Each structure stands twice: as C-alpha cells, then as structure tokens.
Image: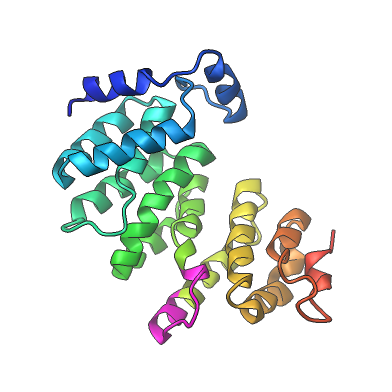
Amino acid sequence: MTLEEALEQLNAHVEAGRAEHMAAYHKQTRKVLGIPNPALNDLTKGWRQSLTVDDRVALADSLWTTDIFEARIAAAKLLTQARIRGDDTVWQLITSWVPDFDSWAIADHACMAAQKRLVADPSRLEEVESWTQSDHMWTRRAALVATLPWAKLNNIKPADQARRSRILGWAATYVPERDWFIQKAIAWWLRDLSKHDAEATRAFLATHGDAMKPFARKEAGKYLKGDTPHADQFAGRT
C-alpha cells in the first residue's frame, strides 16, 4: 500500500465539522482531518492483516512523516500488536518518534505500540531508562507510559518485580517536577499499580506523596480508598 492510497482511505472517513472540535480539544496546530477513532481502528486493523511487517514499518514511517494528526495516530496503531516476528525495525521506528512527541493523544498511541515491544523484549528497558534523563518532557513522560504493563502484573515473577521497582524509581525522580503531564503520568502508573499491589502504592505515597501535586496524589490513591484504615489519607487529601 502506498502512502497516497492510505491517505485516500483516511480521507474517506472524514466527518464534516469534526476537525475543528478535535483540533481545539487536542490543542493541535498540525493538520487535523476529523476522523473518529473507531474508523481509525477499523482501517489500521485491516492494514495490519494485509501487510507484511516490512510494509507496515514503511507505511507507518510515511504516515508519521506527513505530520497529520490522524496519520500519526494511524502509524502508531499500525504497529500496535503483541506478537511480531523480527520486531527490531518496529522498535527502532517507534523509538525514533519519541523526540517528536508534543501532545498526549499521539504520544499515548505510540506508547501503546512501545508497550507491546517492551513486553516482547524487556531488555529494551535499558534504552527506555535513558529517556528519563531527556530534556524533552514528552520523552521523560513516555518512559512511564510505555512501561505501564509492569504496573498491571499479578502473581509477578522476581524478574518483573525488579523491573517494577526500577520503574518506580524513575517515577520517584520525577516527583519534584511540576509539569502537569509528568505528575499525571506518575499518578497514572500508581493508580494502575494500586489495583495489583496496593502495598507498593501506599509505600510510594508514604515516601513521596507530600511532594506530589494534590491532584496527582489524589488520582494515585483513587483505588486505595477504603482498602485500609490509613488509605484515605492518600486518596482524599487535597
């Protein structure tokens, strides 16, 4: 499939009047076509099924380069799949996008693709750890969003427990940052973790909660409320 063919299919799903609303909601200055997410899901699912991995990588690269809002999201969706044989080129392309992140919707879709590749090869956490030292806020944030699978594990194995602790260490270094998106990412990680390891979440909040922004602290403890007599101090503090 050529880029021109893919863009033609994308444009066939544009809804009149939707682009303006989406551009305002997502705070986009790049071109927004006005395509609903379900249509993007259907299109990219078909592309994944009909294209080889190499062709998907090439198309995703071309879609990303257009800098069209929906084309970048479609590029990420095209590479979001649990099992991909010979996925090194997929991982390399996803990581090449990280410095371009500048809005949550595009970044989060790309990070969902990254999550699958990290689970497939956890040794890639070595590279992700370097993101935590970036001057680019969205790159630092991506280190937490891309590693969310380790917040959600039950019956966790020792190797994954070590990885979870490592990522929580990254989150701890982010706590002094006042950026809303960084604080939200910390809260997101802890909120998901609390469903699977409430004790680790409480321990993090006991150590770092006072330094977090109130909204992030509250969000992180959202599912701890009522879990123990002491949980409310984290879930409801403002």
Q: Which residues are magenta?
A: 150-163
> Residue 65 location, x and y as percent?
30, 29
Front residue of 177 and 150: 150
Q: Is residue 58 left or right of residue 125?
A: left
Task: Tell me: residue 32, above or below residue 139.
Answer: above
Residue 189, magenta (yes or no):
no
Q: What quarter of the picture does the C terminus occupy?
A: bottom right
Q: Residue furthest top?
A: 16
Residue at coordinates 15% horizontally, 44% vertically from top-left? Answer: 52
| Residue that appears at 55% across and 19% down | 18
Question: Residue 31, position in %: x, y?
Answer: 45, 19
Q: Quadrant of the N terminus?
A: top left
Is residue 83 depicted above or below 4 in this figure?
below
Across and down, in percent, residue 172 comes to: 59, 68
Side of 109 relative to 168 (left or right): left
Compared across the picture, whether 69 is left or right of 225 comes to left
Q: Is residue 124 visible?
A: no
The residue most toward the bottom is 158
* Residue at image coords 46%, 35%: 38
Residue 153 painted magenta: yes
Q: Observer-nearest residue: 95 or 115?
A: 115
- In this rendering, position of residue 192 left or right of residue 139: right
Rendered residue at 36%/54% (across/down): 114
